[in-house]
Amino acid sequence: MAGHDQTIGSFLWRAERLYPDTEIVARTHDGIERYDYATYADRTRQLANALEASGIEAGDRVATVSWNHHRHFETYFGVPNTGAQLHTINPLLPDEHVQYIVENAGDRLVFVDPSLVEKLESAYDADAFASVEQFVVMGEAVPETSLDPVTDYESFVGEQEPSYEWPELDEDQRAGMCYTSGTTGRPKGVEYTQQMLWSHTMATLTPQGLDIDDGDVVMPVVPMFHVNAWGMPFSLTAAGAKHVYPGPSPDPEDLARLIEDEGVTFTAGVPTVWMGVLEYARENDLDFDSLERVMVGGAAAPKSLIRAFDEEFDVTMLQGWGMTELSPVGTLSHLKDGMEDWDAERKYEKRQKQGLVLPGLEFRVVDDDGEEVPWNGEDFGELYIRGPWVTDSYFERPEADETDFEGSWLKTGDVVSVDEDGYVKIVDRAKDVIKSGGEWISSVELENALMAHDAVSEAAVVGVPHERWQERPAAFVVLADEVGVDRDEVKAELVNLIREDYPKWWVPDATLFIDEVPKTATGKFDKKRLRDEYGDESLVADEAPDER
Ligand code: AMP
């Protein structure tokens, strides 16, 4: 038996002692902020005292609605190290989802970024937010707001002592929580125990993982509200690396400047981000001297992107696949020993795949008959996965537990093939959702919204490939009655219907009228046929909104 549990507090304990002077840098609304691990550790203890003074106890949920910066990072250890649970909320979700999530989780305190106060006000609903006792704006002052009671972060933590005795925690203690947009209906909560975060961190530190060490300067661009920024804040601390946080809505110029000014060696984000940075770097003749590696994931990375970073900047783009349910990293597309000598094209073929499973995980690929498919690079089936950092259930969603798990296996909803070398390749998605720029759009919700229009009898929404956003929604609408109907008028009304209730980036890029939605043998919309028949890239113009 181990004498001590697997808890993430050990990572901070070590970083404070071994790397007190290593920097944590953040781009904020007020410019660049910079301090070291020694100060960071003090501030997490001040935060713990502040939480205690507010009556937060072990087991309570504390939410954040925020971009990537040092204050958000302080909650990453400051909250779970006390035994409370850090619940990161995605501010890009529709208001209704935010309401559901806060109510379902029963958050007691909400930290909110100054630039997201308005968003939270818009989502605020007295009943849904009944459990929330306090809001803390993550800055030095409180803007004009209806959120109440509210205080600013620096007053909240600043008055507290930097000494605090962290409690001994059990590794099964809930440490984190993140909701994933469900295939149908409401988002599903995934809880992370101390042990899940600990084991995920250890796997990411291996050479077959992200291979981060104390010489690295790492910039997580992937949002801290999206599965703990792929676990990076924990991994970087465990390794004693320098952190660089890009702050609110960074554009390619902000990212490029941070890479150059801070000497970033490693960064991570979705493909859309890197396409923007690539374009900017080309236009401005940048060479990214310090940069060695870029992790790309959340959506499939095009080969052209991997090649461009390789050939133009001598930067290795490492594709990763993961899920909220996996804390989140599952596979990484490293080349195996010996493959470095292959010709360039063959190597890109491999690296374009989602890659090799991390040590510690096991998977199988199951076809429609429940049989495991051979690893021949051709046969495909649904990916099932299990391991110490894979959840075995959702928060209070027994009906989803029934469909999404089989024993210890998580049924991922991703359809994959595996080649003879063990490289996993995603070939399709069995779950009915659209992922645009790394964030989910619920096709089912859009369909329901469209079908609420009197003139519409059926509506199906599918994801169509898109160069910049990977996927964009396209709507296929069947009219109840063609006679006397002005299609352009109906189309405009449908767009307005969606705009009223959903973020701008959920509005389908194309709305097409068809005679009938093709159906499967069981009478469900056959989206595969729709995609095959209509879903080429020309359908969606490059007019998706820029802001996320
Ligand atoms: P999330 O839970 O929001 O992180 O989304 C997880 C889902 O994103 C996976 O089940 C895949 O469908 C998709 N995904 C993640 N990484 C990749 C990747 N590298 N390539 C293709 N799809 C991906």
Image (cartoon, helix red, strand yellow):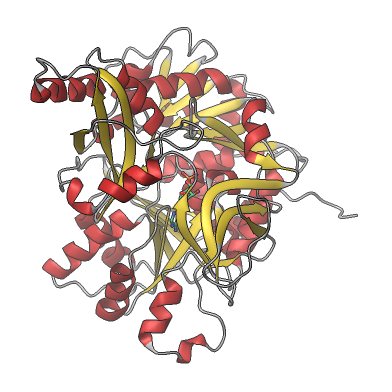
On the image, the x and y values in percent for residue 68 come to: 39, 45
Furthest residue toward right: 1
Q: Quadrant of the C terminus?
A: top left
Lateral position of residue 547 relative to residue 150, left or right: left
On the image, the x and y values in percent for residue 330 come to: 57, 58
Q: Quadrant of residue 503?
A: top left
Q: Nearer the viewer, residue 399 or 92?
A: 399
Question: Is residue 257 in view from this perspective?
Answer: no
The vertical placement of 494 against 89, above or below, is above
How many numbered circles are shown? Answer: 0
Lateral position of residue 366 relative to residue 44, left or right: right
On the image, the x and y values in percent for residue 160 come to: 54, 30
On the image, the x and y values in percent for residue 477 come to: 25, 29
Q: Residue at x 19, y 40 (%)?
A: 545
Q: Nearer the viewer, residue 413 or 253?
A: 413
Question: Is residue 307 in view from this perspective?
Answer: yes
The vertical placement of 448 against 310, above or below, is above
Lateral position of residue 14 relative to residue 425, left or right: right
